[in-house]
Amino acid sequence: MTTHLNAGLRLDNLPIGKFHRRIAVLVGLGMFFDSFDNTLSAAVLASMLPTGFSTLELNSLFLSVTFAGLAIGAAFAGWLGDRVGRSFAFQFSLALFGILALLAALAPSMQVLIALRGVMSIGMGAEYVICYGMITEFIPRARRGRYLGLLGIFAGLGVSLSSLLGWVVIPAFTWRGMFVIGGVGALIAWWLRRGMPESPRWLESRGRYEEAEAVVRQIERESGISRHEADPAPAPQQQNEKAEWVPVTVLFSRPVVRRTLMALILTVTCLFGSYAVTGWMPTFFVKQGMTVSKSLGFNAAIMAGYVAGPLLCMFIVDRLGRRRSIVLFGTLSAIFAGLYPFMKAPALVIAVGFVLVATVASFLTLGLGTTPEFFPTAFRFRGGGFAQTVGRICLIFSPFIVLWLFNSYGVVGVILGVSGMYIVVTLLNVFAGVDTSREALAQIAPGSDEPDNDRRPRASTAP
């Protein structure tokens, strides 16, 4: 007979300490190299066109295979993280895409590179799900917006550095050098975080109370809090047997299906918007007459917005609440996406493109970062993983949609299509947003200890 330790309440009432800062850096390193490897496709594919190593059609296939691998990885991470544990899933995904990145650098043809990219992307897709989920699992709710912003900065640095290094490395060492950098960096990050503890929330949800208690006490010690001071829980309840496994069908049950649908819509929009902007800009520039070198230079300057946006999130999201922040950045993304196609002067192209990327990056960080909060611990990773799986399946077809829009209507058609998607999802969040308060989650998972998306509880879904 063991004691129910209420891990979630204890973790949420801790001050930020060295454990939280260390976990944020280790999670951020994984996100950095995941974003680096994912974004390098923009510069790599653009550089392949003049050499004849690839074509626009093979570039589209490369991106579609990437999206397929990301979808498989997201689904796999959701199951593995909820079933086996967050820590194992975390390390496995990083090792997989690190090793495959090194093999991709040796690819003798575009066809082989596409095949390796597909397997590599499975690890990348898993890493995205797990990184955002780990912030939800470990960081106290009052500071979670700040640390989602920090995670977004790591991701933005990966995007920006990938663009910048592509500008420098590809002319000197060809596209192969980019895969070497990404693969070596990912394996270094894997080694640094090999000692990460298992999530006590997950351990508790699986009935492993003694292990959860040990991890929570470790975190409390590193936060400078004694055991007596840290325990805000009421009188402990007694549990006699291991918790039951919750089947994935719970995501489609009546109390949960609305959350699942909103998670899908939010995920599809933030992913499509991000990939349309980051994945195709260099190619658009080349096709409009720029040299590869100038195209990559423009792209590097604009992609710096992937750092500026999440940096802003760190300072405003916990004040506004995560849902209101999603509405704000969705609105700004729609506005600047609508303006961008009409910018002609180089300075305006860079300035408006920078702001557009910053708002898109903020929306992406908050969209992917808050969807795990839609679901309780017992099926959190499968909820977030399912949303990303469907979102990335949709992205399999997006390169061909983008290519058709570009060939038919130019960059105006592509960007205005993205703007329309942001308008729709913003309106849905205003009028039909999901309530993620503790009381609402308790209705779908009794005893839930999960937080509100804002700093104070809500009784309704009003923003």
Image (cartoon, helix red, strand yellow):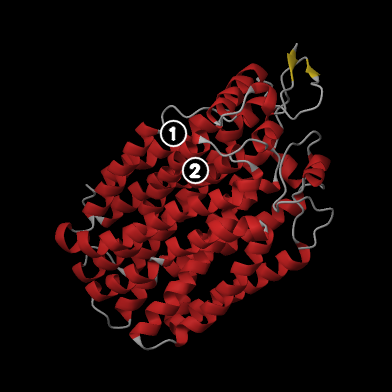
In the rendered structure, the answer to whether residue 302 lies left or right of residue 328 reads: left
Q: Earlier in the sequence, mark 1 or mark 2?
A: 1
Q: Residue at x 53, y 28 (%)?
A: 222
Q: Is residue 52 above or below residue 231?
A: below
Secondary structure at numbered mark 1? helix
Q: Could you say where residue 316 lies in the image, as x and y percent from the top left?
A: 59, 61
Which residue is at the front of the view, 13 or 97? 13
Is disc 1 in contact with disc 2, using a CB cutoff of under 8 Å? yes
Q: Which residue is identified by label 1?
A: 92
Residue 67: % across, % down: 46, 55
The local secondary structure at tag 2 comes to helix
Toward the top, the furthest residue is: 1
When asked about the image quadrant of residue 376, the answer is top right
Residue tagged 2: 126
Report the disc number at residue 307.
none
The quarter of the rendered structure image containing the N terminus is top right
The kind of residue on which mark 1 rests is: Phe
